[in-house]
Amino acid sequence: MTTTAPAPPADAGPLGMNTKARADELRRIPLAEIHESPLNPRKHFEPHALEELKDSLLAAGQLTPITVRPRKGGGYEIAAGHRRYRAAKLATEQHTEAPIRRRNRKGKQR
């Protein structure tokens, strides 16, 4: 007997992920206003891999945006996409487009 998986919900994006949280509109943000998160577990970035990502960014543009959240001191903190951010800086980009994740009243990401 063959069973099929249930259809993903209507708001499911590629890979069946829920996209409601990703529905924030993209905003053009100066890279100078974006700061890396101290919570990022990645501490080492392979220079060769960043160069390849930079070349891809220059050739095809930004295919997947970084995600940022507002910082209390101003500007934005990276929630996802630290490698893409570094590659954009290597490519001497001045701006990037990113959805801004809002926080609820308790300070948690929505």
Image: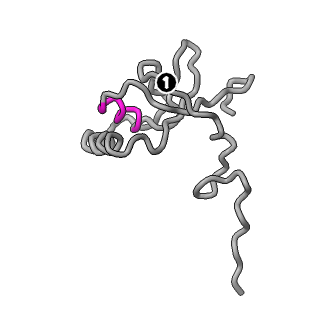
Give the residue at x 33% y 43%: 53
Q: Where 2 sits versus 23, above or below?
A: below
The amino acid marked with disc number 1 is Ile
Query: Is residue 88 within the magenta segment?
Result: yes
Does residue 33 appear to the left or right of 89 in the view shown?
right
Give the residue at x 65% y 46%: 19
Place residue 84 in its image quadrant: top left
Count of residue discs: 1
Q: Where 42 sits versus 94, above or below?
A: below
59 or 18, which is in the foreground? Answer: 59
Q: Which quadrant would the N terminus be assigned to in this image? A: bottom right
Q: To which residue does mark 1 refer?
A: 29
54 or 80, which is in the foreground? Answer: 54
Query: Is residue 54 within the magenta segment?
Result: no
Which stretch appears magenta?
A: 84-91
Q: Where 106 sits versus 12, above or below?
A: above
Give the residue at x 52% y 17%: 75
Q: Label 1, secondary structure: give it.
A: strand
Does residue 46 appear to the left or right of 42 in the view shown?
left
